[in-house]
């Protein structure tokens, strides 16, 4: 696994530190994501989080590892809502409400292969093998649906449109696509 990434592109009301291992003495507030995971400790991402909320004590976020492979991301991203922290552990992505850490969302892609911050559009994008999910200030903004049989490459983001390529199994070719970033719907390319 590679060193964790940090992307603070969005304004955020927290500070976070990826710890090399779980502390011997746990903070009084400790949350495990997802709570029902078996053997969550093995390879988990351990993050000490401090918020800017008056009187809030730091908490430890233990995020279950998805895959132990350098191709999948691990790290921390700020999100469109300043209270949210996106922690990614081996391609498993968790959006944690730092003001109420018991509230979190696990992105359904297993694994997430890439995360893109688009602050101008107010979106955090999660790219999987077949589709793209967009997270906005109010939560899930859109899910593109299937764009590829296996693998997506984003080539450009311009004028509110995301351009990319997806491999089509039936034709064995890379097929271009364009998505409206407001809706996630496919749009025709203008020539």
Image (tube, helix red, strand yellow):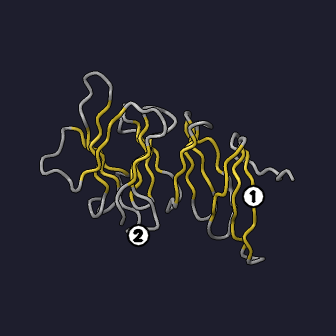
Residue 81 picture location, percent across and down = 49, 33
Residue 22 picture location, percent across and down = 20, 53
Helix, strand or loop at mark 2: loop
Q: At 63% from the left edge and 70% from the top edge, which residue is drawn?
A: 150
Give left or right: position of 81 versus 166: left
**Vertical arrangement, residue 2 with respect to residue 8, above or below:** below
Tell me where residue 36 sits by quadrant: bottom left
Q: At 70% from the left edge and 63% from the top edge, which residue is drawn?
A: 165
**Circles 2 and 1 in contact, beta carbons < 8 Å:** no
Q: Earlier in the sequence, mark 2 or mark 1?
A: 2
**Vertical arrangement, residue 76 with respect to residue 139, above or below:** below
User: Where residue 69 is drawn, which disc sits there?
Assistant: 2
Classify 10 Å Cα crowding around label 1: few (below 14), some (14-19), many (20 and above).
Answer: some
Q: At 36% from the left edge and 39% from the top edge, which residue is drawn?
A: 102
Q: Dividing the image into 4 quarters, which one contains the N terminus?
A: bottom left
**Vertical arrangement, residue 68 with respect to residue 91, above or below:** below
Classify 10 Å Cα crowding around label 2: few (below 14), some (14-19), many (20 and above).
Answer: few
Residue 137 picture location, percent across and down = 55, 34
Tell me where residue 16 sits by quadrant: top left
Q: At 80% from the left edge and 50% from the top edge, which residue is drawn?
A: 187
**Disc 1: which residue:** 177
């Amino acid at each position: 696994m590679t060193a964790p990434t940090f992307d603070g592109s969005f304004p955020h009301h927290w500070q976070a530190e990826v710890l090399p291992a779980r502390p011997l003495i746990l903070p009084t507030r400790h949350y495990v994501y997802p709570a029902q995971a078996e053997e969550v400790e093995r390879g988990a991402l351990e993050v000490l989080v401090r918020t800017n909320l008056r009187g809030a004590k730091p908490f430890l976020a233990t995020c279950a590892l998805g895959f132990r492979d350098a191709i999948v991301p691990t790290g921390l991203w700020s999100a469109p809502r300043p209270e949210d922290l996106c922690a990614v552990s081996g391609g498993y992505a968790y959006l944690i409400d730092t003001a109420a850490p018991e509230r979190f969302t696990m992105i359904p892609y297993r694994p997430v292969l890439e995360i893109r911050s688009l602050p101008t559009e107010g979106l955090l994008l999660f790219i999987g093998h077949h589709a793209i999910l967009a997270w906005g200030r109010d939560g899930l903004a859109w899910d593109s649906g299937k764009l590829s049989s296996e693998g997506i490459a984003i080539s450009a983001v311009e004028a509110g449109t995301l351009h990319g390529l997806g491999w089509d199994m039936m034709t064995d070719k890379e097929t271009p696509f364009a998505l409206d970033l407001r809706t996630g719907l496919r749009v025709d390319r203008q020539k």
